[in-house]
Structure formats: C-alpha cells, structure tokens
Amino acid sequence: MTHKERMLRAARGDWADRLPFVPRLDLWHNANRRRGTFPPGYGPETTTAEIADGLGVGHHRIIPEFLNVRTPDDSIDRGLGIFRLRGYAYRAELQHVDRVVRTEPDGATIVEYHTPVGSVSCKITFTEEMRESGASITWIDEHVIKRPEDYAVVGSIFRNIEVSPDYENYRAFQQEVGDTGLAVAHGVGGASPVQALMRDLVDGTQFYYELADHPKEVQQLVEDMTPFYEQLVRVLAASPAEAVMIGANYDDTITFPPLFEEHILPWLQRWAAVLHASGKLFFTHCDGENEGLLPLLAASGIDVAESVCAPPMVQCSLTAMRQAFGGRITIFGGVPSVVLLEESMTDDEFEAHMRGLFTEIAPGDRFILGVSDMVPPDAKWHRLVRIAEMVEEHGTLPLKTR
Amino acid sequence: MLDEEGLRQAVLKGDRDSVRTFVTAALDTGVDAVKILNAGLLPAMDVVGKRFGAKQIYISEVLLSARAMHAGLALIRPALARAGGGADTKPVVVLGTVKGDLHDIGKNLVGMMLEAGGFTVVDLGTNVSAQKFIQAVNEHGAQVVGLSALLTTTMREMRQTLAELRRSAGTVKAVIGGAPVTQEFADTIGADGYAPDAASAVARIKELVAPA
Ligand code: B1M
C-alpha cells in the first residue's frame, strides 16, 4: 500500500496494512537547512519529500507552507485570514477594495483596505527571531478591527469577496505529492466567522471583550462573512481533492466549550454536510488542549482531527479521545513534539513512551501517527528514525494489544 | 457606605458599570479607598482566580471580571495614592513573553490576575529580549520578573534571559511559566518560581515578595 492509500484508509475508518506515520517536517527542514545541520547523507538541497522518503514515512502535505509565496499577492491578505498559496484549490479575490501596501523601516508590512464604506488597516511582521523559533507563518501585529466602526468595513470586504476554483493549482500540488502522502486542500484557519474574528481580525485577548461589548457588530460580521464561507466550501467540495482542511487551533481554554458550541460547532457540522455530500474527507487542525472539547468535536462531523497533541504537552489522553470519538473520527498525531528532544527525556524514556503509545492506540484503527504540532527544529534525528523503525516492526494493523 | 457583597458580585459578573456605581457611592459616602480595595475588589478577583483554576469559569469571564475590577481601581487610585499606602507602593512585576515567542493570551491572563492580586504589572508584551527585561526591571525597580514561553524553542531563551538578568538586574526574583515549562525546568535554569497557571502565578509571586 502507498502512504496515500494508508492515510486515506485510516481517514475513512478502513484498515490499512500498516499504521501510517506522517510527521510534519517543514519547520525542522527549514531550520536545519539554514543551519546546515541535516543528518549525515543528506545534502544541503535535500527536500522534505526526500527526507520523508529516506525515513520511509508519508510526506506531510496537510498544512500549507505559508511562508513559501510565489508573489507577495499570495499572502498579502493574511490580515483577513486569506491566502492564495501554491496548491490552493480556490482563489479569493477582493472586489471594490483599494489595497495600499507599504513597508515600514523595521520590515513590517502595512496593508490598508479602502472600501466605499470606510478604511481599515493591519500590520504584518516576520522577524529573524520568529524564523529561528520555528514560526511558519507571519504575525499580525495590528489587526484590521481596532474600533467598532471597523466591523462594517471588514464586513463589506468579505461580502464582496469572490471565490473561484483554482483547480489547476491544486492538481499540480496533488501530482507533486503523488502517492507519497495526501494532498489536502486547504480552506481557511477560522472554521467559522467568529473563529476567524478571534484568530485573524482582532487581537486574541481583545476578542473576548469584543464578544461582550459589541455583540451586534459581531453578529453583523458573521452575516457578512457567511457568503464568503459558503462559496469557499462549495468550491472546495467540488474540487479534485479527496480531503479538505478547514479550521485550526482549538483549545479548551481559548475556544472554551460554550464558545465552541455556539460559534464553531454548528459551522463545522455545516461544512461536514456539504463536504460529505461530495464525498470529501473533512480535516480540522486540533493542536491545542482538547480535553474539554471532546464531546463537541465528536459531534462536529469531522473525519480527521489533525495535529492531535498528547500528554505531557496536554492533559487530554489519546485513550480519552479515542473513547469520545467512538470510532467515528480519525486521530492524526499522537507523538508530542517534546519527546523528540534530547533535553526532554532520555533515549530509554523515549523508547518507553513510544511503546506505551503503541499499546495505548491499539488496535490502531482510525489512527494516523504524526508529531504534534510538528517535528521541532532540534529534534533528535535518531528518534525520528526509531519511530519509523517501530512502525515498520510493530505497525502492522491491527496492532497487538499487549 | 460600601455594599461589599454588591461590589463583589459586580466584579464576579464582569459588570463594569455596576462596579463604578458601587465604588462611586462608597467614595461619595466617605468610605476608605483601602477598604473598597481590600473588602470588595481584591476578594472578588481572588474568587475569580480560584474558580478559573478549578475550571468553573472560562477565560472570557476572567477577563471581564479583571476589566471590571480595573474600572473600580481607576476610581479609587487617586485616593489610594493620597492615602500613601496604596497604588504607588504595590510590588512591581515586569512581565513578558520571551524573545522569539509571540503567544500572549496566557501571559495576558497572568498579568491581569497579578494586577487583580495587588501588583503593579509592567507588561512588555511579546518577543521580549533579555535586554528589554533588564532595562524594565531596573527602570521600574521591579521585585519580580515573569517570563512566559509557549514554544519549546523559546524555553531556551528563558535560560539565556535569566542568566543575563542574574548578571545585570541585581536581586530580582524570576518566575517562569507557559505550557511547555515545568518545575523541573525552572529548577534546572535556576528560576525562583514556576507556576502552571495564572492563579498559582499570583500565589507564587506573593510568596516571593512576602517579607521573610
Ligand atoms: C510568569 O509566570 C507565568 C506563570 C504561568 C504562565 C505564564 C507565565 N505564561 C503562561 N502561564 C500559564 O498560565 C496561563 C493561564 O492559566 C497558561 O497560559 P497558556 O498560554 O498555556 O494558556 C492560554 C490561556 C491558552 N492557550 C493558548 O493561548 C495557546 C493555545 C495553542 C493552541 C496555540 C495558539 C492559540 C496559537 N499559536 Co501556537 N499554540 C499552541 C497552543 C496549544 C497548547 N497546547 O498550548 C502551541 C503553543 N503553539 C505551537 C506552535 C508550534 C506555534 N504556535 C504559533 C502560533 C499560534 C497562533 C498565532 C495560531 C496562536 C497564538 C495566539 C496568541 N495571540 O497568543 C507559531 C509560533 C509563533 C511564535 N513565534 O510565537 C507556531 C510555531 C506554529 C507555526 N506553525 O508557526 C506549539 C508549541 C510546540 C512546542 N512545544 O514548541 C503548541 C503547543 C501547539 C502544539 N500542539 O504543538 C499557563 O501556561
């Protein structure tokens, strides 16, 4: 079976021959290429595909490379949560907006949006420190919504966005990935308008005040953004992709259960219905603390909870998650990134952790093994190799419950 | 007259307007600002911290309560300053997320709970270099510096920052926290304190500044 077939089978709840192992390597790759610290045998031009191939694991092509832009246009609307990256199956174009872009002396980008109903602006940064810390996406330093008046402007921008298919772009990506992994068609990070508000449009802490202080504006924004979301999901549903990713960074503190239930869950359910009607698999990025969200995620209609972290990085155990999901949702992840770090545990502790993990997830149905959120830049290479070996040795499905 | 229970409830509900009404009424009738603080605002935030720690309330409620408490604090601040024992003599905590790290929601929460716990907080924001921490500690005469990090990569920056603080910022106590940080790590890098959440950060920092 190819890596792609294994992933698809696991995502659909069918048995693959072997546990798929698909670690996200892009940040590790970027950092080690820059430092010239690839493992022996890998030259400076080695790609993530070659590393994955060398390890004998699936190539993680689930999350777009947000920094890998073809032209500035690919990420210029990052402040709105909108990208036009290589591999995207859609293009979102702003209409009736005059966009003015300038670069500050410190390298930050200011993007102003002038619309018939007013103007808003945002400030985007990406610093050397961020690069070194392994960030894979630029940072919004100033958000488009800073005052109550800004809601209407942002609402008008979203009402006028036209989403069109860009299937050729996606097909090229799909072909490039081939059987080495699953080329997931990416949507947007906010699963719903309110989550987009929280992630992209206002400051993450200010968001909670906004909900309390400006409920009418928030409600109007939700209505204004809905057509954009509907177009987007329609285009993704009709795309050549087998799997679609929408929504990211849930966490039971920041997207706490009542908030999730009111502002995220109904939208996930809606997207699940549209995507399933077209035979698509629905992925969402669950990299935070999921403990308090389990029943809600279980009811969301998603097929794959991607980037699932495990103790000691979070409280929620894989056992609790598997129980809550009741065989209906595939867990993608499970290896907490810290176990790959020399300073976190000894090699013996690492081996014991991994053996425990294999036992915990047995018989291994609905599981794609991955590193959550990603393989860290200083991961001990040998440990990655060891996980790949363990999968090879003990990963035949169903896993033995021992 | 101070409606202590009314004021506490208003803080618990995050109701800024009611907090202002209760505090103004109390000040107008000659109630001592220190009493308003100690009998109304601080105990209410203490309850908020405990409820949050026990997962009985959510982050939005904490933030709204903290904001309501601040609205009350703003009204009594002049009187506290006049009384000489209040705002100006509160212990100072310099707080920030270390260099390379931009996560700030947890750090903000810690800051609000510290303010609510009676500290003056100098929040340096995110991506803060050791140099900036040192400068702020010296400038504000801080007793405690609080470092937050959410990334494994930036936890290392904590070690570095702490080493530089030790060299250049005298006897300031350092408390660290953030999802990947542990007591063990705090011990390894020689931090004076570690706290797994905002409420325990306040408790730990109170212990550190308490006279021995
Ligand atoms: C001074 O004393 C103290 C004492 C206690 C202290 C303290 C200081 N500071 C905190 N505490 C403590 O008290 C607080 C309240 O009780 C608590 O604070 P927390 O901050 O822990 O809790 C908050 C209240 C709620 N929790 C959060 O706010 C973090 C939630 C998760 C999902 C998260 C989020 C939301 C985000 N992220 Co980030 N993010 C994750 C997080 C998952 C997780 N498991 O933590 C984590 C932290 N992120 C991660 C990553 C990798 C990244 N993130 C990034 C970006 C982002 C978002 C922008 C999407 C967003 C941040 C929004 C913001 N304004 O802060 C990037 C980094 C950018 C940068 N340079 O900083 C990026 C590198 C991703 C990328 N591909 O670029 C992971 C770090 C892995 C690791 N160990 O290194 C991560 C654990 C996710 C995962 N599952 O792997 C305690 O820790």
Image: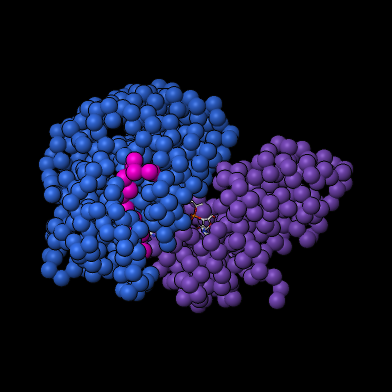
Q: Look at the image and give the colour of chain B.
A: purple
Q: Residue at x 20, y 48 (%)?
A: A16
Q: Is residue A82 left or right of residue B75?
A: left
Q: Nearer the viewer, residue B129 or A183?
A: A183
Ligand 1 quarter of the rendering: bottom left
Q: Is residue A139 left or right of residue A1?
A: right
Quadrant (top left, top right, bottom left, bottom right) of the C terminus of chain B: bottom right
For residue A235, which quarter of the picture? top left
Quadrant (top left, top right, bottom left, bottom right) of the N terminus of chain B: top right
Q: In this orientation, does residue A91 appear?
A: no
Percent x, y of residue B89: 72, 62
Q: Residue at x 46, y 27 (%)?
A: A221
Q: In this orientation, does residue B47 appear?
A: yes
Q: Residue A330 magenta-drawn?
A: yes
The total number of labels drawn is 0
Does A136 appear above or below A116? Answer: below
Range of magenta residues: A325-339
Percent x, y of residue A18: 20, 54
Does A324 appear above or below A38? Answer: above
Does B22 appear above or below A154? Answer: below
Q: Residue A328 magenta-drawn?
A: yes
Display coloring: by chain
Percent x, y of residue B140: 61, 64
Q: Residue at x 48, y 31 (%)?
A: A150
Q: Nearer the viewer, residue A120 or B45?
A: B45
Does A69 appear above or below B171? Answer: above
Q: Look at the image and give the colour of chain A.
A: blue
Percent x, y of residue A84: 25, 37
Q: Nearer the viewer, residue A170 or A77?
A: A170
For residue A328, which quarter of the picture? top left
